[in-house]
């Protein structure tokens, strides 16, 4: 029997996930959708030939008897309400990042899930499902390069729109590194500083770009992440781990190597969606399989909370220019 899914939010990623769950992945069926704009939800159902019911709002969809699990793909500020409602209804919920827009909101979700007594929440951090990051983690965990001492990372986008503000370099962009690097090292952050190099002339007046985020972990590993969202040339994710006895690098996405016109070249992707397209499939298949097996796994509500706590400190560091402590409470045994 297919897992019957209800999807809240039929914007860009909502449509992608609906298509995935109804056409590409195994074992699920989208039976219910909603969006703040009901016409757009109805149009998605029609365009994809889904035969799903359009519910008047997220709460009604969560309560519907036919909905066995929920995908929250609406805009960030609405996530907390829907995830809490899903937990209250005892229904597994996959929530796109951010889990909630404040660390306090993420904490409320953690507490509700612990009170429920069983994991129900998977957060849509997809990088731990990327084959490249998994291969990198396997090398680190094997001990082949010794203990990780330093990480040099970059998150570059060709350009961003007018709505993109300086703090979004943390909440929308760096947030993926905050999650995946913590997972990669199995370590927590303890401090952060943000530096602003010379500003690129390609950024709009209100935006400080690029930025360098310097993180320190509890074991003393130092991480520098360059966030450069108007780099022009491509969408480029880099991660180099310097260990005691060797260096491991995140593999480049597989591309045809070209020998032509006296040049040896590889294309660089321009669109973030292409870079992690397989990882989105794998994370959602893991959610579907986990729910069907009665065991939700993957990035947890605690991971969503940890990323939010670190992001808050990064924003404080952007504003103060100082080194800011990152104080994550002790992880509850529930998330061990
Ligand atoms: P989007 O295109 O703006 O879609 C969001 C949709 O949710 C819109 O249709 C919006 O309607 C609707 N919505 C807003 N409030 C709602 C409510 N209370 N109830 C029901 N629907 C509501 O944004 P998106 O790019 O799909 O992003 C959605 C979420 O996914 C964001 O949290 C984003 O950070 C996350 N995301 C994650 C990744 C990733 O790599 N993991 C990638 C992309 C997006 P209106 O447009 O009418 O407001």
Image (tube, rainbow, N blue to C red):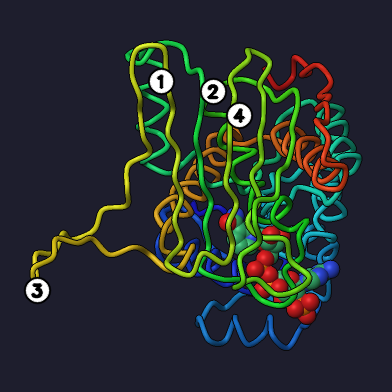
Q: Tell me if the residue at label 1 has its CB under 8 Å from ligand 1.
A: no
Q: CA distance from mark 3 to mark 1?
A: 39 Å
Q: CA distance from mark 4 to mark 1?
A: 13 Å
Residue 282, percent across and down? 44, 47
Please state the quadrant of the image where ligand 1 appears. Answer: bottom right
**Image side of residue 64 versus residue 185, left or right:** right
Which residue appears at 80% of the width and 27% of the height?
Answer: 326
Q: Is residue 130 visible?
A: yes
Numbered label attached to residue 140: 1
Q: CA distance from mark 3 to mark 2?
A: 42 Å
Q: Earlier in the sequence, mark 3 or mark 1?
A: 1
Q: Secondary structure at mark 3?
A: loop
Which residue appears at 78% of the width and 58% of the height?
Answer: 62
Q: Secondary structure at mark 1?
A: helix
Q: Secondary structure at mark 4?
A: helix
Q: Earlier in the sequence, mark 4 or mark 1?
A: 1
Numbered label attached to residue 100: none
Q: CA distance from mark 4 to mark 2?
A: 5 Å
The nearer-to-camera label among 3 and 2 is: 3
Question: What residue would you read off at disc 3?
Answer: 261
**Outermost front residue:** 198
Numbered label attached to residue 182: 4
Callout 1 crowding tier (Cα within 10 Å): few <14, some 14–19, many ≥20: many
Q: Are marks 3 and 2 in contact (CB under 8 Å)?
A: no
Question: What residue would you read off at disc 2?
Answer: 185
Q: Earlier in the sequence, mark 4 or mark 3?
A: 4
Which residue appears at 69% of the width and 85% of the height?
Answer: 40
Comparing 191 with 52, the one in front is: 191
Q: Are marks 4 and 2 in contact (CB under 8 Å)?
A: yes
Which residue appears at 70% of the width and 40% of the height?
Answer: 121
């Amino acid at each position: 029997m297919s897992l019957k899914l209800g999807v809240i939010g039929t914007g860009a990623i909502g449509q992608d996930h609906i298509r995935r769950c109804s056409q590409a992945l195994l074992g699920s069926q989208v039976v219910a959708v909603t969006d703040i704009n009901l016409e757009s939800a109805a149009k998605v159902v029609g365009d994809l030939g889904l035969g799903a019911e359009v519910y008047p709002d997220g709460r009604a969809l969560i309560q519907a008897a036919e909905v066995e699990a929920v995908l929250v793909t609406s805009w960030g500020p609405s996530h907390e309400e829907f995830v809490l409602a899903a937990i209250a209804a005892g229904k597994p919920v996959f929530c796109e990042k951010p889990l909630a827009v404040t660390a306090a909101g993420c904490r409320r979700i953690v507490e509700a899930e612990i009170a429920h007594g069983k994991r129900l929440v998977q957060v849509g951090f997809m990088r731990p499902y990327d084959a490249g990051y998994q291969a990198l983690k396997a090398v680190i965990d094997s001990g082949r390069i010794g203990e990780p001492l330093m990480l040099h990372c970059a998150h570059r986008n060709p350009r961003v729109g007018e709505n993109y503000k300086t703090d979004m370099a943390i909440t929308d962009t760096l947030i993926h590194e905050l999650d995946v690097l913590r997972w990669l090292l199995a370590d927590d952050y303890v401090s952060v500083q943000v530096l602003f190099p010379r500003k690129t002339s390609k950024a709009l007046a209100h935006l400080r770009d690029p930025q360098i985020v310097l993180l320190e972990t509890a074991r003393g590993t130092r991480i520098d992440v360059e966030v450069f969202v108007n780099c022009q040339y491509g969408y480029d994710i880099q991660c180099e781990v310097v260990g005691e006895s060797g260096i491991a690098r995140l593999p480049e996405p597989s591309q045809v190597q070209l020998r032509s016109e006296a040049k040896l070249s590889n294309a660089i992707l321009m669109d973030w969606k292409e870079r992690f397209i397989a990882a989105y499939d794998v994370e959602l298949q893991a959610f579907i399989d986990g729910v069907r097996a009665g065991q939700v796994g993957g990035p947890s509500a605690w991971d969503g909370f940890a990323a939010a706590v670190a992001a808050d400190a990064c924003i404080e560091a952007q504003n103060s220019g100082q080194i800011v402590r990152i104080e994550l409470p002790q992880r509850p045994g529930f998330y061990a």
